Image: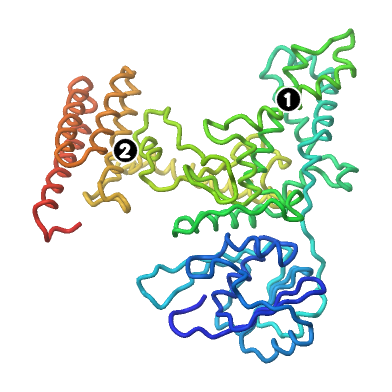
Amino acid sequence: MAVKGEKESAILVVVDGARLWMAKDLNDDICLTIVALASEDPANWEEAKSAWSRYRTRLISESIDAFPFEETDREHALTSLRAAPIWFAIDFPHHRVFIHGMTMEVGRDAVLAAEVDDSSEKPSPLSIHLPPWWEMHEDASADHVFQPRSSPVVKPYVDREVLYGDAFLEDIANRILSVVASLEWRESNADKDESARHPFTVQVHRDWLMTTRTDLGGRMPRQLLHGARNWLGLLTDSQSIRIMNGEPIVALPVDWSGFETAPIGSQEMILYFDLCREVIQAGWFWCATEAEVGPNGVGSASLAPLIEFLRSVKDNWLSSPFEGGAPPASLIEYDRRRVPCGTGTAIEGIEDEPVSGHVIDCDCPICEMMAEGMFGIGFTSLDGHQLDSDDEFAFSMAETQEEWEKQLQEYADFSYAMNQKSTDHDADDELEDVYASAWSGIQTDEQLPGDKSGFLKKAFMVAEIISCLKEVDAPSHEIQGLNECFANYRRSEGDQRLLAASQFKENLQTLADRYPSLVSKSADLQSRVDESARSAVCDDTDPDAPF
């Protein structure tokens, strides 16, 4: 991006249908920030301007209207571009970006840094991630801006009314009733044996996704889930980068012309998989407990009440808190508005309360430290592992069959390599397993990066001791007592820390006396607590002591 010192002025032209705007005497930081707006796939200049707060930094004007844009005509714009050594152009109707005269290549996917003359000012990040259907032309000629695009615009169009609405519920209900009336269902005893229902769940889910539909123009529902996942992930990640650098997280506006049919991101894709499974499994339950069963099984008269039941299941699932945090509907909104789900982080443009912290239910001191925000902002992200649990292409995050088969081969090669490594490891009795214990990986007394207080390293040790206590079925009050002593120790300050350290050590010694397998771990952790106390005294008394 720009470098410190004198910045050469540039021209930026905006093509918006029959209307054109041009601004002169802009520096390249400003021009690149305006170009970055195309990352969001705005339909026109007005939509692009409404995304300005997602990209502007503390080094750039708060309002895009502060820049000297004036409406112009094609002849004047073309003449100005031909004469300018550095220029930029954004063509909204044809989804194109043009750059000319930059000394560096920008690229369609980049994270740049704007710098200022004041060396004390930290550079601000700027992410550019053009959608797959946008073109980036660098070292372009001015005439190219007003020539037709050579390739068609192929953009995913998502009909969420079909994916989530009556079409979805009716299709699933019909498939459920058809399965329940089949000989395979009766012979499997699936009406009474819940474990026998899984193959039928996979069948209904797969058939829903992989069957072409007239209301989708001959496309399959699965096709609506793909096409832009990686691009949307980059946009969401760029907002995470912003907050790490002191900039606010800003949600995409919902009043854009293409918002309702915009492509689906990975988080919505994963949650849609879970929703389908929830609805289908609820359908089996309803057929087994609520449906009127005639001599030939569940009849077509059950269709309407089943659809209504599935609708209530869908609505309830979407609005219920997910693992103690935000409900799926909110997580889907985050994904559609291209912002990360950060613990306790307010998002401009979303009125919901910030997502609460990690739920403490695992006796883990590291989790407790995370919940207290000791590691900064925690972002919640679903990994989608469940999509691969059935070894079915239909559910995978791979867009094509070829991509999926390649991933399967890569996973098989990796598994083989790891199994071979494990076999070689077992054959060498003298080879040390450096992952066997938290202690084995601690080769130095130096602090972990970002862990100035040294509590993180101790937390790993406490977590291992707790694991040992669980292995011997130690009573829960002993585990809780250890966690409380460690928490009091790391939360205390000054003279109170000396007292808390003493109580923590006493607790460790009591556990060692009761469980001989903990003697060495307890002794080592106590010595580290003592060393931390000595270091703290040194810092307080020696003005030349290092931080």
The image quadrant that residue 494 belongs to is: top left
From the viewer's perspective, is residue 230 above or below residue 153?
A: above
Label 2 neighbour load within 10 Å: few <14, some 14-19, many 20+: few
Q: Where is residue 35 in the image (x, y as percent from the top left)?
A: 63, 71
Residue extending farthest top: 295
Q: Which sits in the foreground, 155 or 335?
A: 335
Q: Which sits in the foreground, 376 or 202?
A: 376
Q: Position of residue 432 (x, y in %)?
A: 31, 43
From the viewer's perspective, is residue 333 above or below residue 470?
A: below
Q: Position of residue 122 (x, y in %)?
A: 40, 67
Identity, as a three-letter code, of the amino acid under mark 2: Ser
**Is residue 457 left or right of 21 when viewed as pictured?**
left
**Is residue 63 left or right of 214 when viewed as pictured?**
left
Among the two numbered marks 1 and 2 on one chain, the one whose residue lies closer to the N terminus: 1
Q: Which sits in the foreground, 364 or 143?
A: 143
Dot 1: what SS?
Answer: helix
Nearer the viewer's eye, disc 1 or disc 2? Answer: 1
Label 1 neighbour load within 10 Å: few <14, some 14-19, many 20+: few
Q: Which residue is found at the position 74% from the left and 11% from the top?
A: 289
**Is residue 395 left or right of 177 when viewed as pictured?**
left
Q: Which residue is found at the position 35% from the left and 71% from the top?
A: 120
Dot 2: what SS?
Answer: loop
The residue where tag 2 is placed is 437
The residue where tag 1 is placed is 312
Q: Which residue is found at the position 88% from the left and 9% from the top?
A: 294
Q: Where is residue 36 in the image (x, y as percent from the top left)?
A: 61, 67
Q: Which residue is found at the position 25% from the left and 46% from the top?
A: 454
